[in-house]
Image (cartoon, rainbow, N blue to C red):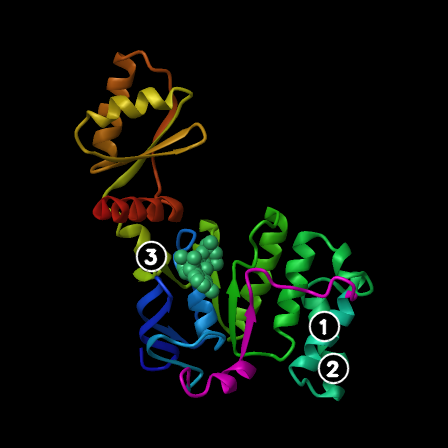
Amino acid sequence: MTDSIIQTTGLTKSFKKTLAVDALDLAIGSGELFGLVGPDGAGKTTTLRLLAGLLSLSEGEATVAGYDLRKESESIKKHIGYMAQQFSLYAELSVLENLQFFAEIYDVPKEKMAERTEKLLQFARLTEFKDRRAAHLSGGMQKKLALACTLIHEPRILLLDEPTTGVDPISRREFWDILTNLHLNGTTIIVSTPYMDEADRCSRVGLIYTGKLVICDSPRQIKAALPGEMVEFLTDEWQKVKTLVAKLPGVLEAQTYGEALHLLVDDGNKRLKQITKALTKSGIKFRGARVAPVRMEEAFISLIQRLEDDES
Ligand SMILES: Nc1ncnc2c1ncn2[C@@H]1O[C@H](COP(=O)(O)OP(=O)(O)OP(=O)(O)O)[C@@H](O)[C@H]1O
Ligand SMILES: [Mg+2]
């Protein structure tokens, strides 16, 4: 990509014995909505903190908005908005006072303050709560306020570290509507998330595993790269089903989601018939047998299972 707004080559960060980020090559285009996913401890936060200029690089090169992370990390800060995984608001300050506080930190000109806080309050749907103390907001509202504070200096690049973790589904959706608007306005967004439905809303997604970028592509391509098709069975006896299908040909993998058992198979229609037959013959009760579309969640679990198998 020639017009990358973020570019890293061999980006590496080690903490004493831990190699948290291991030779990351990343090119993010201007205006992308880029998702960062990976298991706990994979290196997502460290990557975002490096890009925000908050950590020094151990090795490698990186530019953010045209600035060199090694030499100009201070200059980067006014172009980015960074929302930490544990973003701290000032609990005793009101919603409006929090916004004003961050405006001062980021040197927002006094004459622009009123207009901008007004706009952000509306944007985050917090206008009617503007005098409420941050401590008394719901979790979802706190996240929206944190995002609003992150936007106060109108950054071109947003680095958001799990901004919706622990938030209810309705608030998550609202938060993503806000992100989508920012994306449509041309803001470049990198967002880490444990939620696969959120990953699905990104233009591209990078999977980090033990500090390495193991896949980086559009959600559509990531799902298409899964070696096979999914068949789904609803059953209370999924353990029995799992044991049985493990012996059948063409079954590559089994994942359980509540009472739904998702099997990755080489040929959906063919194996659906065979497995249905085998289950009936064994007297295992099931319903809703179907070839199901692959979801992001399955694509990632499958990728991670294969990575773990390779390691052991
Ligand atoms: N300041 C630090 N000192 C020492 N080790 C650290 C430090 N920060 C992170 N690490 C280690 O680096 C690795 C990557 O951590 P990081 O926080 O980047 O992961 P993550 O992908 O954000 O995880 P999570 O999903 O749990 O937030 C972990 O092994 C972590 O323990
Ligand atoms: Mg993290």
Measured Cα–Cα span from mark 2 to mark 3: 42 Å
Disc 2 residue type? Met
Identify which residue is drawn at 40% across, 84% down. 70
Q: Which residue is mark 3?
A: 210
Name the residue at 21% across, 47% down. Answer: 310
Residue drawn where x is 32% and y is 19% of the image:
240
Q: Which residue is mark 2?
A: 113
| Residue on which the image places disc 1 | 99
Tell me which amino acid carries mark 3: Thr
In the displayed structure, would residue 35 be above or below residue 61? above
The image quadrant where one finds the C terminus is top left
In this rendering, which labeled residue sits more in front, label 2 or label 3? Answer: 3
Single out the mark in the foreground, 1 or 2. Answer: 1
Q: Is residue 101 visible to the viewer in this orientation of the structure?
A: yes
The one nearer the camera, 46 or 220, is: 46
Q: Position of residue 42 (x, y in %)?
A: 38, 56
Q: Amino acid at mark 1?
A: Leu
For marks 2 and 3 on the same chain, the one whose residue lies earlier in the sequence: 2
